[in-house]
Image (tube, rainbow, N blue to C red):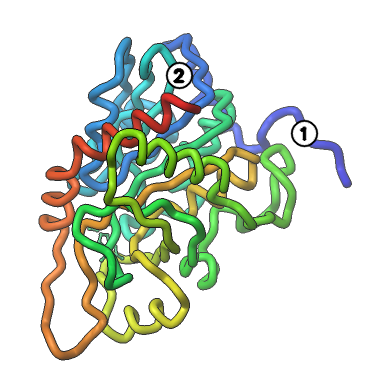
Amino acid sequence: MAARPQHPADPKYYEALNWIKERVSSRPKIGVVCGSGLGKFADTLEDVTSFDYKDIPHFPVSTVEGHKGCLVFGKLNGKELVCMQGRFHLYEGYEASACAFPIRLFKLLGVEKLALTNAAGGLNQNYKLGDFMLVKDHLNLPALMGLSPTLGVNDLYWGPRFINMHNCYDQELRDLAKKVAAEIGEEKIQEGVYQCQVGPCYETVAEQKLAQAAGVDALGMSTVYEVVAARHCDIKCFAISMITNICNPSYDVVTEVNHEEVIECATTRGDAMVKLISAILDKW
Ligand SMILES: O=P(O)(O)O[C@@H]1C[C@H](O)[C@@H](CO)O1
Ligand SMILES: Nc1nc2[nH]cnc2c(=O)[nH]1
């Protein structure tokens, strides 16, 4: 196999990296991505340096409500973190590689472990509104349709051409999260399979039935392309979905899902999410 290059081939990455390095000395080993309405975690950090995405060279900008659009460097009980207060989605018109741009930047900054959160619809009919689902695996519909951050010429700087996705949501980190949830008395913990579709349509009944047949527990529009990019460059991943609406895979009752409801649930359970993720990251 060819030797690993010393730098990424695309200069965009070090232009963004150098811009950040000139402004902050922190080199965190932990990265966090906050999902829809779940950015409050970043507000609880100490010794904060925050950048608007629009000011960082080549960084995409957030266009969705509930995604503030700030890259926050800070400390959690003295531990350095870098946190995305808002992420990017394919339905915003971004390519998968743009959605994953910050993850590769995290790698260059020295991030070794990544915690991701998202808002998702509970397809598993045992799930309740406000539950937390530890993601144990995913069904990456965009990738099955040919949308992935790893398409095109492979840059060996990041990783190999073909990517192993077994245990992509790290078992040890999941086991630790279960232990921590029990310790802090958080009982609304599930563990399941997350499916990403491009969006922005929520799923039809037929699409929900297809996902159920495939063993999917929660439906969303993000996270998987970040995880693919992270695994490509050997960052360990851990993800929690907040169940912000309950899916209805039936024609008998007409249900309304909307982003306001998603944000409302994420906001209502925001403090519980902050408590859980803080307790988990404290142990990393
Ligand atoms: O960024 P996440 O995955 O948390 O956002 C979810 C998926 C869509 O962007 C939006 C739908 O309400 O919430
Ligand atoms: N695809 C999808 N994404 C979501 N994000 C929050 N709720 C949902 C949902 O029901 N479906």
- What residue is drawn where x is 27% and y is 33%? 274
> Secondary structure beneath disc 2?
helix
Q: Position of residue 170 (x, y in %)?
A: 56, 46
Name the quadrant where ligand 2 sits.
Answer: bottom left
Q: Is residue 256 left or right of residue 68?
A: left
- What residue is drawn where x is 41% and y is 51%? 134
Viewer-proximal residue among 86 and 13: 86
| 2 or 1: tag closer to the N-terminus | 1
Q: Residues within 10 Å of mark 1 (few under 14, many from 20)?
A: few
Figure disc tally: 2
Viewer-proximal residue among 58 and 105: 105
Q: Is residue 169 left or right of residue 256?
A: right
Q: Residues within 10 Å of mark 2 (few under 14, many from 20)?
A: some
Q: Position of residue 100 (x, y in %)?
A: 48, 45
- What residue is drawn where x is 49% and y is 38%? 176
Which disc number belongs to residue 5?
A: 1
The residue where tag 2 is placed is 20
Q: Amino acid at mark 1?
A: Pro
> Secondary structure beneath disc 1?
loop
